[in-house]
Image (cartoon, grey):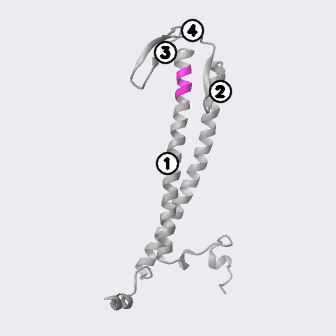
Amino acid sequence: MPPANSSSSSGGAPPGSVSLAFLSAPQLRALQTRLTSELEHLTSSHAKLRAAQSKFRDCVRSINDGVTGSEKKGTKGRDEILVPLTSSLYVKGRLTDREKVLVDVGTGFYVEKTPAKAISFYEDKIKGLDSNLQELEKIVQGKSSQLRVIEEALRQKMLSGDGVPSQAAAAGAG
């Protein structure tokens, strides 16, 4: 029967947890691999959320500069715009209505909104993504510290000789 966990021997670990000292080197390596994979996935998700946030900021900037116009950029009162057909091909266009824009609200649905309401919609999206990004960053930091602890435990196992085959087993094989 395993010894009961006490706060002094388990360091206040949650019930059901296993001390890294009791894991073998292959188990530690498997744990390290799993955490590394999780971190790669979380990092990729973080980059995608940042890209979405940047897209929404571009939408706000486009409404401010292109639809409502900007005196600083010389677009206030001008109806001529360049309409992108591809990332490097444009045609000249003319704004016929500065009072309404079509907003992609997801899954191919568009809603007509005033520029002010469209900006508010995108700013809410940006704020929502910002809170998601902050939560994700905390998770990534936690997983990174777990990975460092596991790598250190694995390093200690290897240095103590617990992670390599014993010399007797190696001599018997040769």
Disc 1, SS: helix
Q: Which amino acid is tagged 4?
A: Thr
Disc 3, SS: loop
**Which numbered disc, 3 or 2, marks the residue that appears first in the sequence?**
3
**Which numbered disc, 2 or 4, marks the residue that appears first in the sequence?**
4
**In the drawing, does residue 43 fall left or right of residue 12?**
left
Disc 4, SS: loop
Q: Which residue is mark 1?
A: 44
Q: Residue at x 35, y 87 (%)?
A: 170
Q: Nearer the viewer, residue 10 or 89?
A: 89
Q: Which amino acid is tagged 1?
A: Ser
Whether residue 122 appears in magenta in the rendering, the answer is no
Q: Which amino acid is tagged 2?
A: Ser
Q: Which residue is mark 3?
A: 72
Question: What is the quadrant of the C terminus in the image?
Answer: bottom left
Label at residue 120: 2
Q: Nearer the viewer, residue 31 or 19?
A: 31
Q: Which residue is mark 4?
A: 96
The answer to the question of whether label 4 and label 1 lie on touching residues, with beta carbons closer than 8 A, is no
